[in-house]
Image (cartoon, grey):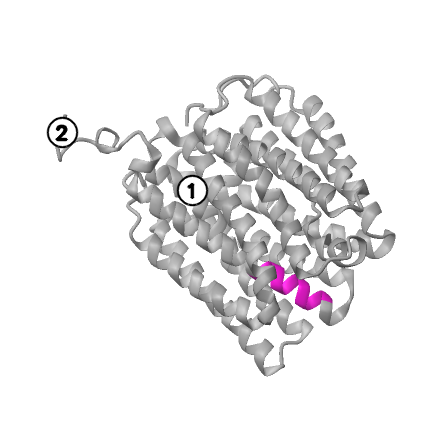
């Protein structure tokens, strides 16, 4: 039966994700931009460790991306809620392309110093500070609430597909020099910007409330007043802060597992292999009951997998542990994002997701800094083991501090 042209958006929107042309375009754009950034991260990590041979510098790479996310959070939320979210994403892609071109030019000309790399990474971090929460907030603009959890899981497959392909490609292409990697990344960022331009956001509801100090910090107040949201966001903050191992992968690849850039690419891709498997399953078979218990089980498994990786001296076992780590993290991500997005009004999603990104996104980069500092003091293996067991301890503490979280049954709640 044909659907009338004047029917409301929910009536005109197909129920299959593949039937959503806008969502397919968004999925492709997210896959491309995430993959390119992962390629860039492999090149930067290997190049700077080759340049300085200092584990602490790998931690500083994470710090340079952490600071913009924290300092710009309140402004990012306002921008994402008041302006076309597609335009925000487009602009961030152009800035990322410019940063990649600067890294390429500096590598070719020989003037790319340690300090300049940190400066460029800070700029890339600023672009990602606007990009990440906007990419999460735009999903409810594209699909109806009835299929939002599946769209979140499918969006996660875009990220994990990119994290699998990006690092492996980055490691292989690095054989032709870091500049080659950076130029390809710049081209991909521009392509993602073009794709986002064709995405239709029929469910978008821009906030027209006059800007004030209250609206600037509305995201903080909304989360703090809702224990479910505060609990899941803070759980991820501390688990990832303690459990981050990405910054130490160059050390494991070169010094412990005795591989080259190709091995680093495989290690960086391994978590995404597990995460992709989990995300694909969740996009087809969503968690319908005992969501809170699944959340805590996944975070505990995440910590155990990190500890196993820390003890491994085999590339195959290390990749298996990292795959389990990624699979557990993907389950946690889909549950957390479903809880947050389904319990937040659309016109506030930008500010809420900006705060969410400030805590959960920055915990990853700050966790890399934590790992780098501990590796410089204690060695890479103790740094990883302490982080993994710390994530398990956080899981147990949060079950007692937020007893309502384990009791959550369904993912979708009222906004």
Asked if 17 appears above or below 357 in the picture, the reply is above
The picture places residue 355, in percent across and down from the top left corner, at 54, 43
Q: Quadrant of the N terminus?
A: top left
Horizontally, residue 39 falls left or right of residue 153, namely: right
- Disc 2 element: loop
Start and end of the magenta stretch?
40-49
Q: Quadrant of the C terminus?
A: top left
Q: Is residue 41 magenta?
A: yes
Asked if 401 appears above or below 76 in the picture, the reply is above
Nearer to me, 46 or 398: 46
Q: Which residue is mark 1?
A: 137
Whether residue 218 is visible: no
Question: Which residue is pictured at 75% across the width and 70% down the height?
Answer: 52
- Disc 1 element: helix
Q: Quadrant of residue 120?
A: bottom right
- Upstream in sequence: badge 2 or badge 1: 2
Give the overall secondary structure of the magenta segment. helix
Near mark 2 (Cα within 10 A), the count class, few <14, some 14-19 or many ≥20, is: few
Kindly report the distance in space between the C-alpha atoms of the residues bearing marks 2 and 1. Answer: 31 Å
Which mark is on residue 2?
2
Question: Which residue is pictured at 78% across the width and 35% down the height?
Answer: 389
Q: Is residue 350 magenta?
A: no
Nearer to me, 79 or 14: 14
Horizontally, residue 200 falls left or right of residue 56, namely: left
Nearer to me, 207 or 63: 63
Nearer to me, 335 or 213: 335
Horizontally, residue 192 falls left or right of residue 407, namely: left
Question: Which residue is pictured at 39% across the width and 43% down the height?
Answer: 138
């Amino acid at each position: 039966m044909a659907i009338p042209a004047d029917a409301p958006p929910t009536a005109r929107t197909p129920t299959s994700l593949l039937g959503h042309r806008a969502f397919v375009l968004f999925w492709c754009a997210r896959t491309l931009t995430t993959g390119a950034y992962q390629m860039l991260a492999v090149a930067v990590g290997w190049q700077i460790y080759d340049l300085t041979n200092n584990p602490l510098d790998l931690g500083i790479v994470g710090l340079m991306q952490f600071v913009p996310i924290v300092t710009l959070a309140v402004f990012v939320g306002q921008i994402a809620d008041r302006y076309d979210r597609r335009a925000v994403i487009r602009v961030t892609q152009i800035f990322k392309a410019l940063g990649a071109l600067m890294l390429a030019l500096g590598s070719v000309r020989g003037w790319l110093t340690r300090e300049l790399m940190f400066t460029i990474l800070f700029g890339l971090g600023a672009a990602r500070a606007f990009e990440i929460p906007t990419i999460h907030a735009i999903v409810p603009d594209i699909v109806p609430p009835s299929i939002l959890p599946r769209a979140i899981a499918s969006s996660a497959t875009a990220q994990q597909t990119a994290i699998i392909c990006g690092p492996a490609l980055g490691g292989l292409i690095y054989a032709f020099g870091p500049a080659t990697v950076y130029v390809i990344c710049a081209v991909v960022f521009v392509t993602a910007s073009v794709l986002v331009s064709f995405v239709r956001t029929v469910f978008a509801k821009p906030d027209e409330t006059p800007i004030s100090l209250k609206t600037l910090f509305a995201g903080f107040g909304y989360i703090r007043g809702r224990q479910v949201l505060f609990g899941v966001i803070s759980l991820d903050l501390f688990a990832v802060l303690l459990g981050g191992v990405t910054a130490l992968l160059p050390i494991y690849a070169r010094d412990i597992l005795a591989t080259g850039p190709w091995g680093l690419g495989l290690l960086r891709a391994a978590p995404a292999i597990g995460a992709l498997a989990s995300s694909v399953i969740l996009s087809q078979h969503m968690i319908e009951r005992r969501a809170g218990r699944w959340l805590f089980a996944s975070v505990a498994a995440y910590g155990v997998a990190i500890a196993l990786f820390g003890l491994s001296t085999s590339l195959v076992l290390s990749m298996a542990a990292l795959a389990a780590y990624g699979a557990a993290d993907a389950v946690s991500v889909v549950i957390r994002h479903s809880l947050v997005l389904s319990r937040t009004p659309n016109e506030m999603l930008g500010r809420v997701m900006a705060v969410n990104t400030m805590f959960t996104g920055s915990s990853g980069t700050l966790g890399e800094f934590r790992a780098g500092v501990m590796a410089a003091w204690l060695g890479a293996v103790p740094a990883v083991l302490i982080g993994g067991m710390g994530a398990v301890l956080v899981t147990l503490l949060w079950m007692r501090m937020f007893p309502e979280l384990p009791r959550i049954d369904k993912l979708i709640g009222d906004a």
